[in-house]
Amino acid sequence: MWEWIVEPWRYGFMRQALAATLIVGATCSLLGVYVVLRRMAFVGDAIAHTTLPGLAIAYLNRWNLLAGALVAALATALAIGWLSRGRRLREDAAIGVAFSGMFALGVALTSRMKSQRDFAHLLFGNVLAVTTADLIGLAAAGVLTCGALWLFNKEWMLTTIDPLHAQTIGLSPEWMRQLLLVLLALAVVSGIQAVGVVLTTSLMVTPAASAALITRRLPWMFAWSATFAGVGGVVGLYASYYLSISAGASIVLACTLLFGLASLAARWRQRNRLTAASAGCGP
Amino acid sequence: MTAAKPCDPFLPYGGRGHRDPRPDQPALAVERLRTRYAGAAGWTLVDVSLRIAAGARVALVGPNGAGKSTLLKTIAGLIPVAAGRVRIYGNSIGACHHRLTYLPQRSELDWQFPCTVADLVMTGRYVHMGWLRWPRRADRERVAEALRRLEIAPLADRRIGDLSGGQQQRALLARALAQEACLFLLDEPLNGLDESTRDLLDDVLSAHTRAGGCVLAATHDLGRLAESFDSAVFLRDGQIENQFALRSEGEFRYPPRHFHGRVES
């Protein structure tokens, strides 16, 4: 049994993958709390998908892939913030248009690639090939995101609950939203390393959504979200190692499984509370 | 207002410090104010002029779409002033934002957010904290006091999503008290509330004006107009149609049995 547990970690690439998964998981899942609370899951998905043309252009020109993704993601984040300001176009429609158009451009560009395997790595990530330099970049993005969340939590909280009050006291909800979008872009790009363009959103949304099911306090939601992402990452890597399945997909599947367990737990707890209340011994 | 002068925030929101009220200036002076919504053809408010002295409770009455909410939002700095002038304690909009609070209609808040009633009331203190500052003991004391005043102290750790409509409105007013704002702008504060909550809010607001604060409230509740307000402003199609006092000066303004919300007998 012990042998079964430690065996994967004898390999350097697995240890690197574990470190990357935990860092990315923490970054994405902590930020994911606000993505879920502000109902921005679709925006996150859009930013993830629009990084594809950036990645493809960087790949074809032999530039740094992450830099390409980051530029594309930041451009999208700023564009979404700008487009949805005037409310001339409904936000979801604006995002829908930009998102599918950019993704199509990415697919068109990648179809000129010689190797379809590289394309698959962009779409679904390849956490097993993470280098030490990548890890440093991921850690930097993680520190930046978590630091910002810690420093500006009270402002994001207020602009989410009551943007009008925030604006009256001189705190611009627009700016806080824009800042969140920029961090979202950063988290998305780090998520691409682990699970790829298509699945990054799930790393952001699934752990936070699971946390929202089992707790009703913001600090606990952050804690649970990071826990779910961490456990999902480790379980996913084991599954990937022993079942020989794609690491990105198995991490996402593990997170989804945890979401299922969390919703069962939430339902079970609710039913217990109801029976307790009907038996007259409720609080 | 007799409250102690709050300390200036370290890094204030909006980049502007808090200015003191100018002496001899009314709490609110609106002169020939015009506003319009972005993209709209006509004016939403046309040449609205209004003066509210410290200690006054003014009702803003009028049919739907008359511009009541727009006027409140413009004074709160949420809608830009197209023409005319708004002065709050003699200062321009934004320079005095800690002295003003705007209570939106309850539907404009996200009540599903996972935070407690105490957290929500604490957001009233944010204007005094500014960036990179966290609640301190004095802030927590003010919050506890405001919760007690609105009789929702036992709900402090309740999630805001679990509150009833009346409790939500109490929490919002508690936030305004915690902010130690002087000028309260209220949008339909008594809509859909039970009688006891209305009485409590009335008490709190009358205590607030007696202490020198000011209230400007949009209301539909004409039945309570005379007993809850000093004067009323009738708005129609963005213009002030009529404006009159509901009580003559010198008349005893508030029954003595009301004192800080408790009944003395």
Image: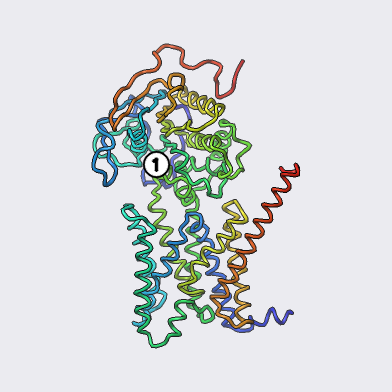
Chain ID for label 1? A
Horizontal placement of A71 versus B158: left or right? left
Q: Residue at x 55, y 65 (%)?
A: A26
Amino acid type assigned to the residue bearing label 1 in the image = Thr
Q: Quadrant of the N terminus of chain B?
A: top left
Q: Specify the quadrant of the image occupied by residue A17.
A: bottom right
Q: Is residue B218 visible?
A: yes
Which colour assignment does the render follow?
Answer: rainbow
Q: Whole-percent x and y of residue A189?
A: 44, 70
The percent position of residue B253, horizontal first and vertical second, equals 46, 16
Residue depicted at x 43% and y 45%: A166
Q: Nearer the viewer, residue A154 or B227?
A: B227
The crowding category of the residue bearing disc 1, from other C-alpha atoms within 10 Å (few below 14, some 14 to 19, many at least 20), is many
Task: Identify residue for label 1.
Answer: A168
Callout 1: SS: helix
For the residue pair A191 and B11, the one nearer the viewer reads as A191
Q: Is residue A2 above or below residue B156?
A: below
Could one spot residue A183 in this view of the protein? no
Q: Is residue B217 above or below residue A245?
A: above
Q: Residue at x 52, y 78 (%)?
A: A127
The C terminus of chain B, quarter of image? top right
Displayed quadrant of residue B24: top left
On the image, the x and y values in percent for residue A213 come to: 60, 56
